[in-house]
Image (cartoon, grey):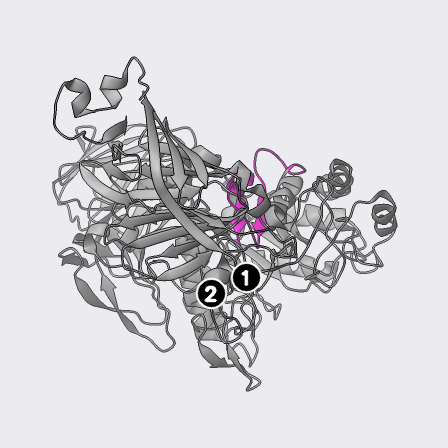
Amino acid sequence: MRWGHSTFLGLCLLWACGSEEAPAPIVILSGSAELHFAPDGRSFELWAYGQKKATFPTDAFQLGLVNQLSDALSYDPYWLEHSDELFQPSAPPDLRFRSVESSVIEAEAQKVTLRQSYTGGAAATVVFSVTGDRRFKVEWVPVVSTPIAYLRLRSRANDAAYYGLGEWPDGINHKGKLRPMQMEPDLSVESANTENHVPIPLLLGTDGWGVFVESRRQGIFDVARKESDLLEITYGTAEASAAGLIFHLFAEERPLDLTRHYYQITGQPKLPARWAYGPLIWRDENRDQAEVLDDVRKIRELDLPTSGIWIDRPYARAVNTFDFEPTKFPDPAAMVQAAHAAGLRVALWHTPYLETTAEPYRTQAVQAGYFVPQPGLRLNGWSDPIDFTNPAATAFWKERLRGYAQLGIEGYKLDYAEDVLSGLGGARAKWGFFDGSSELTMHDGYTRLYHQTYAATLPNEGYFLLCRAARWGSQVYGPVIWPGDLDADFTKYRERATNRAGDVRTAVGGLPTSLNFALGLGPSGFPFYGADTGGYRHSPPDAETFIRWFQQTTFSTVMQVGDSSSQPPWVYTEENGRDQSTLDLYRIYARIHLRLFPYVWSYASQLANDGRAIMRPLGLAHPELGVHPADTYLFGEHLLIAPVLERGQRAREVQFPGGTWYSWGTGHAITATPGETRTIDAPLELIPVFIRAGGIVPMLEPHLDTLSPATDPGVDSFATDPGRLVVWLAANEGEASRFTVYDGTVIEQSGALDLKITPGTVFTKGVRFELYGMAPSSVKVDGEVLPPVSGTVINTVEQGWVGGDPLSVIVLPPGAHTVELR
């Protein structure tokens, strides 16, 4: 064995200290996390905070050997395991997996190397190193003497739930599931695919450990599906096996904190433009410029809080001519200026294609070789994709996009770009790119280059990219993930359903599927998510679906509203069943979403530090409860959201983390033991929302219309005047609480009735506290008694207070203040 000079601090061998007992494990330390290696080097364990998190036994590393690699096969490991009505598992006939037979271990400070010999004569080197606090990097490199098709990692884990792995339609806890890291066909559902448009090889255990696989190849995570404690990760490395496989192991006391390791490995998430938070409104088809301008007018005339719009196709002469069809959009610059004046930023639908009539650019692209030179199966109706591995093609595309930027376009809805699949049933769908890459890695890489190209043409200080698909690392371009075309109803994934025409289908899923996506993506490193509020397939949604959906997206990181029927909220038809009361209710919820901006943006601004998702699954935020509902989540630290996901439901059961929670709808307090379930009324106009005792929720004033700059009179813009900060604050249970707003404003609650505010750089015009569970008889501000005022006057004064049950209000002038309630 080889030892470094500081070995004794990080590596322990009892026999090295003179003991004659059997040698103890070799240990690498990284903060509170440890890797324990058996002295023979054939197995190891991950420990953290004094607890064993995972065991990697003697068969942890397996090589999938074949006699000869075939260029016709994809070696997608999904087809080794998957079965359905059309497909059965299929492996190369000569495939055999081999485990480690013996290993030589070499140890030095913060690094261990295993030199492995496998049954059948194969060999590999595995290097473990410390790369961060409580994080280890593992580089597994086989010696390719016999062709290798697959690399497989196996672990025996504790009884835990597992989150992460990106976007999945059928649930948020992956235990018992087979999860491919590439989109696969599923001909049994209406969309004909597995709907995992954002597969991320990041697995998070609720017992506080995680693994991230740093590979662009095709892979699968088999999560305790074969055996209750067995985790298997298999990658089809084939001709690239000599490069090996890199994965990372990490641990945290709180599972929510595990995602920060993903960001530190792959890049910090870029925040979208503030206006992208929404609300945003769009039509699936805009008839012409006159309709766009009419929508802009209606948004403001109807007092609908909105920060942006996008124009979906068709608007250009063809896909993609980088212009506006002149007879329908005669003055696009004036159109964009009118939207800006009304406080609405503007984005466009786009794709990486040039259809036959997209001249002159189609001919230029063909002659210059800007399309993918060896295309596989095309999954769009326009053209082969532009090859973004070709620098000249990328430069050509960027130059065309700059014309839109000059008009004031600040974002794109990036659709399609999922043509590059690895194959079907184990056979390759061969693609060849300019840089020599193939579909074996570009199934992962193409969408990332797509996003990168568009991001490079947009304002660096903030833009909007609404993306159907993404892969690991794409978060550095600031995408808002949109899940594609969900059903405009309450169906669940794979549920048999009947549409308006009477056709029976196997559903992609509606509102329940959307929430699965949202709660899966945040912990997986994609914190911004915006589904089509109301759904898309078989739209328009009926009034109940629309209401329950906009109630949920109110308490989400992006609220965008539109569907395939092109019926915005103010359009009433017999088919959608909406009326004035529906619009009035929508206005209330859209305003709440806008007002929550300081709360949400404060968490967004902390992503680079703590990595914690903004929309947090209850079971991941509170693993001690042992429950993993997909219909309840924490929105930040202080709000518990329990949306209604079933038609006709007017009450629902809600599981609480424990403690006292105040109903947002009524202000009434609910005190629950951890994991206790209560039945909560949920009339159609109300979504169950609760603020925890001691909770602090900073908000905007209710008169604001938009986050975007505005010049039209009567449009109140946050960008122009942020106004006074409003703070929902719930009585604590004797413990101090504190919230730092993204601008540096600090709000503190110490003891049961003492408050303090220190202003930051944006909210400098005073504060309005709205207090839940506090009914003071007197108020002192900075040691002076504050006189009470009447309930009607409180909305017009610079300072004052009014008591109430369940809500009291205190208004304070600009500056730092200490408040005593008695």
Highlighted range, magenta: 456-482
Residue 696 on image: x %, y %: 28, 43
Please, what is the three-letter code of the amino acid marked with disc 1? Glu
Q: Residues within 10 Å of mark 1 (few under 14, many from 20)?
A: many
Q: Nearer the viewer, residue 91 or 631?
A: 91
Q: Are marks 1 and 2 in contact (CB under 8 Å)?
A: yes
Q: Nearer the viewer, residue 75 or 806?
A: 75
Residue 115 on image: x %, y %: 39, 32
Mark in front: 1 vs 2: 2
- Picture quarter containing residue 760? top left
Residue 244 lies left or right of residue 551; in this view the side is: right
Above or below for 458 versus 654: above
Identify residue for label 1.
Answer: 184
Residue 748 lies left or right of residue 604; in this view the side is: left
Identify residue for label 2.
Answer: 82
Residue 308 on image: x %, y %: 58, 50
Q: Earlier in the sequence, mark 1 or mark 2?
A: 2
Residue 309 on image: x %, y %: 60, 53
Q: In what element is the residue under mark 1?
A: loop
Residue ranking furthest to the front: 120
Cα–Cα gap, marks 1 and 2: 10 Å
Quarter of the picture containing the C terminus is: top left
